[in-house]
């Protein structure tokens, strides 16, 4: 899900286009009992209102990188394959796929009963058009096709992707999130995709307003029509406002929940809170092109100097899991490795041997108004104990990205969201020539391991390679991993058929609202 | 406001029997509210100056395991989400908030008064040029202007002071200019001009002192606005940077904890309220005494 | 008089051109690259270069400026970089919400200022006066985000009387429009009301001391009529002038109130535009604010002359 969190950093929101102003939750009345898990049951009446904390920048799935946009687009578009809540890929627009023995050719068989919201029929040409649009126009997700040589359509129901090297992460690359959505052939010319939807998903997009957007059920959806008539997204950035709206029944669902409220909300009548581990992780990266952080000992001193448990307590109120690697515990790719304990004495010794003097300054760049600001304050206190004086540098994401790109920082703290494949977790961040290796990490051994792992098709062998690489990355403090936060969402009692997902994708296809 | 018809002139103190500041003070102490707010502000100044010795703990001293504790004997105002003593942070925040207010207003005072003096005294094209420029700044919504300035300079306390200072400069320029226009043609100023005194001497020895009352009132009121502006900037994340405590920042962070730890927001909130109220009430009292024609806060435009 | 109007119009135009240059300069001084921002963290250098080339941001600044001004004159403010939508459409979409809030807030301000200011002027330096003064000052002393959050917790949360946020169009449902408007309008109006109270108080005070009021009283006019006909008319002058400025300020968006109440106004839009470095959107918004500001001031000045017969612009210095 790309750098989705960036979107949330800039969000200030508004509410309610007023297109459908049925403020009472049961104003239009949902049918009781029809809470079939598949959502294949007879369509249920009603509008489902969701308050999201971010505001979408625009709605072209191939162009936007904002998480808030994808919250909406998740319900409008489909991809060839789709991750389930374990991160395993399941059929969506493709019913099945095969890989050639050399791992260089992937063949996808497409569904034959799919229509777009505009009534046109879905076939292989649409897939070609969508993927080629991303590649040819060098849109934000073009990197996902880096190893793709050619995409062809042998017939209307088949798509063949030829690769330059085996790419076990291909399913993630073409279906990991709705940024890889399939749009009808010619859609970019026919529609203004920034404001108009042209998907195959369960809901069709209404026109976007300043305070929200409404989606209407798509009766001809290939998976059957969704359970509610309408989904209305409202943009509410202030948490107090969102929570109050949830309590009063003005909205049914929100993701705008400060971690300190989780506990009290859980015991509140009429509200259900979903807390589930996510695949996101928070980390600190020290600039290895800047003294003294170019020295391993200095970086390790920071790793020993910080207190992860305290950081999790203060920033997440426990709604997170401390982790010294990137991949969370319940994931197949998890590797149990945690060499650093909070040990100020050890940290001081390491600083001494690196020749770092008392009072060494360390600027930590964080994106404004994120939990990173809280985390950085704990680090400031932790690192003051070992003689490092931390300056917290809050930046809006635009400046933050600039400084990151220019390498103008001592250290930064940030998170990666929504990765599913270990390639996404480790490769571009730690490969010496990697696109996101802003910290300047360069370890030929790690490069070697990452290269091998990227094209290793045996899953266990691949995991062994990534485990090895992860240990070195952690030991070298390329990233100083902190924790995996939980996904926290809350909804009104009586909302059924909603499932919280580790990649934070929100899908309202099967949700129903009780009277 | 772009027009201030200056048909009537401010009563300029010409009584010779008692210095004007003494006169003012005498009038002021007859107003109990002015006394009360004056005392509050003196108290705040003491806290601001000596807060670091009065505060029992450091501004980012964190008690692990002691997060979100209710007020008690050991933490009078409780602790915050990072386990920091709120009482200490409120005391230390006094200095930050007062400094931001004072420096910001100081910047706009110096810049605005200088521009207003030049425009009012010389008139003609200089007046037009300077005041049109002030109009341009004034046409920006205040908070947006401050945010834009911070976007250029980078966030942080010092830059917040500069940003707020820039936002309030046009107000001071207008107040000063309007006041200067009323005294420019006074007999004694014409007299010193004809006696060959230099412009600089006339401006600073004669014009400024006589044009001062509305400026003084404006200064007091702007201090109140500046503290609120800092709070507003903190709300959007641009004011004082963590872990430094400013009241605005503490209040803004405390808003997420109203239902769990009311003390986090209550005490810094009270501090802002009392301080701003004191400046406002004092400003009002001063205005009654100094500026009955209400030349100051022409716009009352605040960066909120 | 018409000469004066012409002169003022000309001045406004100069200021407007100045503002357009100023905003253009400010925006291009702001660090932070809109392209990187739009693409997010994962974009490759090639994607970055491709979008940058398409955006026209590599043209010389002067060319960019004149392109912008040229189309702005035809009502085309360009396309918002972030949303891919025309700036004019984005602004128009937010006008109803902004206008509703600004007008309602001014009404709230007047409802506070006129009674409070009049009462306190009728009994100057009495406990009533002090009470009125301090309570109006108190309204000016609470950070507005705080006031808004407290309102939400109390009136939407605990009491459940009002919706916690959001905007409903007047034409869709007038009742809901009003209900959604109450809390934001009060939050935004209190500060303006406090400022206005001072001016009402002093102008009523001043009017009461005028010869013609004394004469009217001496002639046996009833106190109430005196108050209505002479005193309040006098008080109208600052109401119009100061109130006009407050209205201009409210029209350019009350950022914080909008954030707290999820109100889709221009202030939030402008703030987002700054943060996302959405150049064209910010330029358009600020230009609009400047036009509003200058227009309101012009109208105020002209009204001023109408209301206060003592003032004439013939040969006025400015």
Image: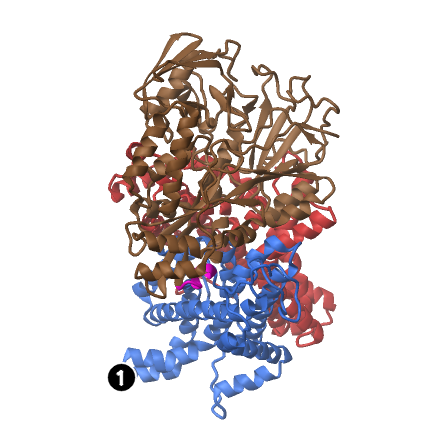
Chain colours: A brown, B blue, C red
Q: Is residue C296 left or right of residue C64?
A: right
Is residue B160 visible in the rendered image? The answer is no
- From where the camera sits, is residue A343 visible? yes
Q: Residue at x 57, y 21 (%)?
A: A202
In terms of depth relative to the viewer, which is nearer, C301 or A267? A267
Instruction: Look at the image and tell me in which quarter the C terminus of chain A lies.
Output: top right
The x, y position of residue A165, in whole percent, is 31, 22
> In the structure shown, which secondary structural element does the residue marked by tag 1 occupy?
loop
**With respect to residue A40, does A514 lie above or below?**
below
Magenta-drawn stretch contains A383: yes
Q: How many badges with numbers are in the image?
A: 1
Determine whether B56 is above or below A196 in the image: below
Q: Residue furthest bottom?
A: B17
- Would you place residue A349 above or below residue A501 in this image? below
Front residue of B183/C261: it is C261
Picture quarter containing residue B189? bottom left
- Which residue is at a point 67% across and 73% down the rendered structure image? C130
Relative depth, front residue between B161 and B211:
B161
Chain to which mark 1 belongs: B
Specify start and end residues of the magenta stretch as a single range.
A381-387
Name the spot of residue A246 as percent of width and height, x first: 66, 41
Q: Name the spot of residue B51 as percent of width and height, x first.
A: 51, 75
- Residue pointed to by mark 1: B196
């Amino acid at each position: 899900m790309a750098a989705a969190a960036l979107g949330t950093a800039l969000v200030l929101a508004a509410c309610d286009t007023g297109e459908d102003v049925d403020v009472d939750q049961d104003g239009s009345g949902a049918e009781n009992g029809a809470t079939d898990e598949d959502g294949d049951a007879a369509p249920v009446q009603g509008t489902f209102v969701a308050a999201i904390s971010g505001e979408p920048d625009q709605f072209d799935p191939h162009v936007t990188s904002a998480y808030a946009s994808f919250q909406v687009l998740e319900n409008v578009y489909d991809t060839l394959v789709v991750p389930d809540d374990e991160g395993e890929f399941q059929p969506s627009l493709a019913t099945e796929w095969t890989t050639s023995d050399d791992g260089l050719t992937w063949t996808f068989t497409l569904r034959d009963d799919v229509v777009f919201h505009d009534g046109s029929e879905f076939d292989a040409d649409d897939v070609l058009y969508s993927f080629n649009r991303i590649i040819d126009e060098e849109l934000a997700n073009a990197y996902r096709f880096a190893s793709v040589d050619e995409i062809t359509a042998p017939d209307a129901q088949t798509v063949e992707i030829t690769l330059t090297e085996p790419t076990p992460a291909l399913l993630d690359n073409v279906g990991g999130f709705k940024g890889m959505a399939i749009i009808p052939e010619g859609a970019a010319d026919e529609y203004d995709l920034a404001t108009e939807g042209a998907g195959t998903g369960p809901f069709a997009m209404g026109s976007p307003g300043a305070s929200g957007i409404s989606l209407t059920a798509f009766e001809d959806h290939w998976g059957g029509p969704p359970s509610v008539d309408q989904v209305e997204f409202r943009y509410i950035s202030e948490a107090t406002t969102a929570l109050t709206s949830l309590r009063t029944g003005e909205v049914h669902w929100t993701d705008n929940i400060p971690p300190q409220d989780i506990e009290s909300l859980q015991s509140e009548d009429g509200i259900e809170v979903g807390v589930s581990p996510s695949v996101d992780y928070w980390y600190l990266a020290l600039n290895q092109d800047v003294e003294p952080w170019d020295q391993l000992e200095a970086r390790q001193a920071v790793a020993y100097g910080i207190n992860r448990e305290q950081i999790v307590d203060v920033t997440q109120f426990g709604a997170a899991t401390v982790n010294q690697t990137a991949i969370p515990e319940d994931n197949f790719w998890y590797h149990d490795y945690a060499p650093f304990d909070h040990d100020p004495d050890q940290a001081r010794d390491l600083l001494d041997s690196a020749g770092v003097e008392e009072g060494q300054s360390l600027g930590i760049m964080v994106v404004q108004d994120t939990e990173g600001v809280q985390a950085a304050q704990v680090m400031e206190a932790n690192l003051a104990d070992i003689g490092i004086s931390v300056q917290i540098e809050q930046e809006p994401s635009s400046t933050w990205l600039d400084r990151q790109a220019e390498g103008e920082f001592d250290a930064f703290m940030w998170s990666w969201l929504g990765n599913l494949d270990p390639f996404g977790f480790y490769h571009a961040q730690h490969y010496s020539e990697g696109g996101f290796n802003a910290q300047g990490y360069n370890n030929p051994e790690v490069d070697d391991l990452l290269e091998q792992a990227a094209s290793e098709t045996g899953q266990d062998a691949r995991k062994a390679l990534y485990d090895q690489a992860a240990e070195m990355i952690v030991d070298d403090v390329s990233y100083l991993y902190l924790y995996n936060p939980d996904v926290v969402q809350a909804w009104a009692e009586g909302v059924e058929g909603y499932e919280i997902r580790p990649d934070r994708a929100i899908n309202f296809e099967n949700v129903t609202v009780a009277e | 406001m772009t027009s201030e018809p200056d048909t009537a002139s401010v009563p300029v103190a010409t009584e010779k029997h008692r210095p004007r500041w003494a006169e003012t003070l005498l009038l002021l102490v007859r107003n109990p509210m002015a006394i009360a707010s004056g005392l509050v502000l003196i108290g705040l100044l003491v806290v601001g100056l000596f807060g670091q010795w009065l505060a029992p703990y450091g501004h980012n001293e964190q008690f692990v395991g002691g997060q979100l504790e209710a007020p008690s004997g050991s933490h009078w105002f409780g602790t915050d989400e990072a386990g920091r003593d709120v009482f200490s942070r409120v005391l230390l925040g006094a200095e930050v908030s007062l400094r931001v207010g004072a420096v910001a207003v100081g910047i706009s005072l110096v810049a605005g008064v200088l521009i207003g003096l030049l425009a009012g005294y010389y008139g003609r094209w200089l007046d037009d040029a300077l005041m049109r420029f002030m109009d341009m700044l004034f046409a920006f919504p205040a908070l947006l202007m401050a945010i834009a300035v911070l976007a250029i300079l980078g966030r942080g306390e010092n830059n917040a002071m500069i940003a707020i200072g820039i936002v309030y400069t046009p107000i001071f320029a207008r107040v000063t200019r309007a006041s200067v226009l009323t005294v420019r043609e006074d007999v004694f100023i014409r007299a010193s001009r004809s006696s060959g005194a230099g412009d600089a001497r006339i401006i600073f020895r004669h014009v400024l002192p006589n044009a001062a009352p509305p400026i003084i009132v404006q200064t007091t009121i702007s201090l109140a606005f500046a503290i609120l502006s800092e709070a507003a900037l903190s709300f959007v994340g641009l004011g004082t940077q963590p872990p430094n405590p400013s009241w605005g920042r503490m209040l803004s962070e405390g808003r997420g904890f109203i239902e769990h730890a009311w003390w986090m927001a209550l005490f810094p909130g009270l501090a802002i309220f009392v301080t701003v109220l004191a400046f406002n009430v004092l400003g009002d009292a001063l205005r009654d005494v100094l500026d009955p024609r209400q030349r100051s806060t022409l716009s009352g435009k605040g960066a909120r | 008089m018409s000469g004066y109007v012409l002169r003022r119009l000309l001045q406004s135009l100069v200021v407007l051109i100045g503002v357009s240059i100023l905003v253009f300069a400010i925006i291009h001084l702001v660090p932070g690259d809109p392209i990187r921002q739009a693409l997010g963290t994962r974009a490759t250098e090639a994607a970055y270069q491709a979008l940058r080339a398409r955006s026209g941001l590599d043209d010389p600044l002067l060319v960019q400026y004149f392109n912008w001004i040229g189309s702005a004159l035809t009502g085309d403010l360009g396309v918002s970089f972030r949303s891919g939508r025309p700036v004019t459409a984005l602004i128009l979409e937010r006008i109803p919400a902004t206008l509703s809030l600004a007008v309602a807030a001014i009404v709230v301000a007047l409802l506070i200022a006129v009674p409070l200011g009049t009462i306190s002027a009728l009994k100057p330096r009495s406990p009533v006066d002090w009470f009125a003064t301090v309570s109006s000052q108190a309204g000016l002393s609470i950070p507005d985000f705080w006031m808004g959050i407290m309102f939400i917790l109390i009136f939407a949360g605990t009491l459940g009387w009002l919706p916690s946020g959001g905007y409903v169009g007047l034409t869709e449902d007038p009742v809901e429009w009003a209900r959604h408007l109450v809390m934001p309008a009060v939050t935004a109006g209190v500060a303006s009301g406090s400022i206005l109270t001072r001016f009402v108080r002093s102008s009523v005070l001043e009017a009461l001391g005028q010869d013609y009021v004394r004469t009217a009283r001496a002639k046996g006019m009833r106190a109430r009529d005196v108050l209505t006909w002479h005193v309040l008319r006098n008080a109208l002058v600052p109401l119009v002038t100061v109130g006009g400025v407050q209205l201009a300020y409210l029209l350019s968006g009350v950022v914080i109130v909008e954030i707290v109440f999820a109100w889709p106004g221009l202030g939030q839009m402008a703030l987002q535009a700054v943060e996302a470095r959405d150049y064209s959107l910010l330029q358009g918004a600020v230009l609009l604010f400047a036009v509003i500001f200058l227009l309101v001031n012009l109208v105020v000045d002209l009204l001023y002359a109408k209301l206060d017969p003592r003032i004439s612009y013939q040969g006025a210095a400015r």
